[in-house]
Structure formats: C-alpha cells, structure tokens
Amino acid sequence: MSLPDGFLDELRTRLSIAQVVGRKVTWDTRKSNVGKGDYWSPCPFHQEKTASFHVDDRKGFFYCFGCHAKGDALTFVRETENVGFMEAVEILAGEAGMPVPKRDPVAQKKADQRTVLAEIMEQALQFYRMQLKTNVATAARDYLDGRGMPQVIQDRFEIGFAPDTRSALFQHLTGKGIKPEDLDEAGLCVKPDDGGSPFDRFRGRIIFPIRDARGRCIAFGGRAMDPNARAKYLNSPETPLFDKGRSLYNHGPAREAAGKAQSLIVAEGYMDVIALAQAGFDHAVAPLGTAITENQLQLMWRMSPEPIIALDGDTAGIRAARRLIDLALPLMEAGKSLRFVVLPEGQDPDDLLKASGAKAMQDLLDAAQPMVRLLWEREIEGKVFDSPERRASLDASLRTALSAIKDPSLRNHYTAAIKELRAELFAPKHGTSTQQNAPWSGGWRNKPPQNATSGLKSSLLGQKTATDTTRLREALILAAAIRNPHAAVEHETMLEKSPIAAPDLIKIQSALLALLHMDLSEDQGSGPLIAALTDRLGFNPMDHLMTLPPVRIHPHLHPDADPELVAMTLREELVKHAAIKGAEAELRDAEEEVEGLADEGLTWRIQQASEARANATKADIKSGGDGSEDRENLSLNLQKMIDDQIWVKKKG
C-alpha cells in the first residue's frame, strides 16, 4: 500500500519516540537528560547491564552502541513487536489518533504528482533567484542593502525577486513544457474566473522560499516593493505541498541549530529570522502569516522543550503572546513549556539587533519569562482588586485557565506558582497592617476628631501589642508550619489568611504556601520542604526564624519534636494570632466610631475586644513545657470567641 505523501512525517511528528521506546525499557535516570530529549537504557535487542542504548527524542531516532541497532519509532515497533511495516504504522497511528488511509489505488499517483510539484517549485525558485540579479530588481537589491542584508545571507536564504509583470514566471515555466494546470496547483499562478489567461501570483515582490523539514521548497513568501500594495506580505495558498498551519519558516536549519544551542527562538516573520541568523542566532523559526497553531507548537517542541517566543514590543505582539497561552496550556506536559520575550516597544528583532547588537538580544533571551508569569500578568493587568468580589473574580478566572492543564503534576506546580504570585500581590505593604492594606477593612475612612472620649481611647484603644511580641508569634507560626508540613496543609486556609507584618516573614510565608503541596511521605519529615524553601529563598528559613531565642529553645520546634506537639503548637499560635488581630481590628473600628461621648454599647464593645486580646496573650509563648491540656483548652476557648465574634456590635 502506498501511503499519502507526508503521512509518515506527520505520524513521526505527533509521536515521541521516547514514549514509544519507554514502554519496553527502563531509563537510566543518572545518564538520561529528559530536558534535552536525551535518553539512555540497557538495550532491548541484546542482553546487557550497561546503558548503551540511546534515544534522541528530538531527532526521533535510536541507536545502540553495543549491537548497533538503529532506526526510528516504526523500526522499533517492527523489531520489538515482530510485525510488518503497515502493522507498525497502524499501531503507532492508533496511539497518535491518526486514521490510517484506506487502500487507495490512486495514492501512488498523488504521491507522484507531489513530486512533480516539488520539482516545479525548485524551477520557480531558480527563476526568482536569477531575476534578483537583473536590472528590473535594482530597487529590490537597494532595499536589501538598506536592510543590511549582505550577499552571503541572501544566498543562504535563497532570496529572489518576482518581476512586476503579469506573466513572466508563467511564460518561463510553460516554455519549458510545464502544464498550466500544474502551475495553478502549485500555487504559482492564478487562473481568472472569467477564463482568461493565467497570471503570476507573485509580482513586484522580494521572494522568500519556504522549505519543509526535509528541505523541499513547498511555498513562497513575497514582500511587496510597492508601499501601496494591498498586502505587504503574501504567502503561497494551501496546496498539496503546503499546509501553512503545519509549516515553519527556516524549519530544517533551525532544527539542527537548536540541538547545538539547546534553545529555539520563535520570531514573527521572515526578516526577523534572517536578522537573527545574521547575528549568529541560527536557531530561529517563524510561523507563516498566522497565529501559531497546535501543529506548529508540536513541531517546535520536537526541536526544543522550551521554545522562546520573541514578539514585537507592540500591542499586537503582546496580544498574540497572550492568545498563545490558551493554545499551549492544554498541550503542555512535564518538560514541554514556553518562555516569552517581549521586545522594547516599537522594535522587532531586526531593529534591536541594529540598534544594540547581539548581546542585547542575548540578554533579553536569557531573561525570558516563564509562561506562568505571562498568564498572571494577563489576568491582573489594568485591574484593581480593592474588594473581595474582585479578588474572587481573579481567583475564578485563574482556576478556569489552570483547569485546561491536563497533566496533574504540572497543574499542581502552576497552582503553587500562582499562589505565590497572589500572596505577593496581596501581601501587606511594609509598615502597614493587613487591615490597613485591605481597602474594605475600614482603613480608608476618615478619622474622628479629638473629643471627650480621648481618655477612654488612650486607656483601652492604646493597649497595642508590642512589635517584638507580634514578630515572635508570627515566627512561631512559620517555624511550626515548616516543622510539620502535614499539619500546615490541614491549616492551610488559616495559615494563608494569617496576617504577617514583618517583610522578611512575609517572604517566608509566601514561599511556604507556594511549596506546601510538594510530595512528602510521612517519614520524610520537614527536610525536603526546608531544602526546597532554602533553594527558593536563598537562605535557610529555620536558621532565620531561630535567631529569636524563644523560637530556638521552644521544646516543640526542634528537629526531633513529636509531630503531634508541633501540630498543637501551630494550631494554638494560629488561633491566638487570629484572636489578637481580630480584637485589634475591632478596636480600630470602634475608635473610628467615637464621635462624642462614649455610649454604653460602644464601651461594652471595647471592653469585650480588650478582654479577648488579653485572654489571647495569657499563654506564655516563651515556654512549651507541661500543661498541654490547659493550652489546648485555652485554644478552644479562643477559637469559640473568634467564631462568636463577641466583640462585634449586634444588630437589634
């Protein structure tokens, strides 16, 4: 059976050979580099103990350095399953979700026709290349010189020129015996609806040949020399050779260069790719006049696990990047993602390279942002989150976006990263309390004038918790949460809402919440979490928290402490902190309502709030010895006070 031209290429593109081979072998994790698509294992074709069997997932081939077996995914299935070629095709097509074409007696004829069209495209390219050297292309050569494109680059990218006449190419190729209908099928000429003579599709344009991954010329792109042309850039139409949604400009050369550079740049157009190559960035491709498609994205991931999307620094470029997020999220998996570079406003890669050089471009590429950052900025840009409703709306939109990620592990990591960014956005600013930072807490109201109640205010409202005591309580909460991650997960909501004032402790709180759901077994303790926090923060959080002597000597916070006692300490400190902060908020609110002589109801509220705060601070946080039952009873009583909100004015 003759398969349609391109079917096997599409099959290989959709499948990862590492996944196909991985069903039969066990990868050597020490020798393999998954991020680079580099896999090693003992060979499945001969008995051995060493990992001499190599799979290059990017190129789609395997090779054994012991028995010298080699091939692609089809070869591997044929050899390991002991099946024929077509059976192997059917097996892999089923995995890729591709229907195998039915037996078609004219399939070979169609394949032969594609071969004919490819030969015609090569002859057309030769014609365009020759025309660039003639007098009719003087303006085109001047333009290329003005863009700083030397002859060596023009030759490398096979730049040509289509003369501004109606049928120069048509007459040239038909004069060589090529059928007019073949020129039409190749997309080189246009046949008028009125039955007139066919005319050239490209006229008065600089020509950029588009080759597929195998190096065949499958289409052309043309840039108009006339500034008044209806389209500045024009691509070949869809043909039996050319599917623009499955093609990339500079695909073949970039694939080879990406392996060496361990990177892939995705620019917007031909001139961007050429300018990058001229500056030494050979690993660049571009979509062909449309937004990036799912098929193009899969092609990019075959070349690099984390392509860098480099877009022009204008509104259209940023909008295109954000649209790409929605396309990529459902397709991502471990080891496959995107990074983004948005160039300075009003510049494309060519502009930047001419103005600032290759180093400036490399600096931007090195600073490329992960996709999660672009997703976050898309959701918060231009918005003000000054109410619970607006924050809830943000949470809802983020949940919707993240739900598109199919890989559970990857979705968890995205959720953790978003949680950290959210914590940073809503963290209290330096020198302000959580209530002051929240516009709905009452901090924006005008303060009442001084009046006869100033004595009451100074005696009751003036009883502020000392800063050092607050910091100590916050440090105890964080230390206990880090020592017992499982207890921290149980109290995650309270931990997240717990108002932390000190900037250095806010940083630890944000990192802890972001890493709280990392995989931990019961017997691992807090070691892996502390290591992950240290890596994220740049310092050991426990060492930082232990600088406070009461934390350092606390009997329930040392590494060998009973997890139950650590959990009890965390629960107690969280409840006390919530009670104190709740009472302080009520005191501030009551202070603002004092507008004359204190009435009986207001005085009662202040007394109740003060009592709640006093009860919350009765426990000696400097000790953690016996009396755990009393401490537990105190925590339960405090929690009841919080639940009942005894200090809040009841509406009659």
Image (cartoon, rainbow, N blue to C red):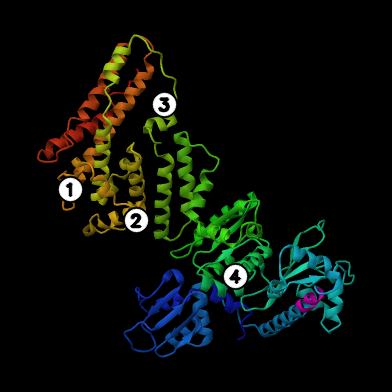
Q: Residues within 10 Å of mark 2 (few under 14, many from 20)?
A: few
Nearest to viewer (mark 4 / mark 3): 4
In this view, the residue farthest toward the left is: 626
Of badges 1 and 2, the one in the foreground is 2
Residue that label 3 marks: 443
Q: Nearer the viewer, residue 327 or 443?
A: 443
Q: Earlier in the sequence, mark 4 or mark 2?
A: 4
Magenta highlight range: 125-131
Q: Give the x, y percent position of residue 106.
A: 69, 83
| Residue nearer the viewer, 124 or 102 | 124
Q: Which residue is mark 4?
A: 282
Nearer-N-terminus badge (3/2): 3
Q: Amino acid at mark 3?
A: Gly
Residue 19: numbered disc? none
Q: Secondary structure at mark 2?
A: helix
Instruction: Locate residue 452 relative to residue 306 in the image: left or right.
Output: left
Q: Is residue 100 above or below residue 546?
A: below
Residue 594 found in image quarter: top left
Q: Could you tell me the amino acid type at mark 1?
A: Glu
How far apart marks 1 and 2 lie (CA) works out to 27 Å
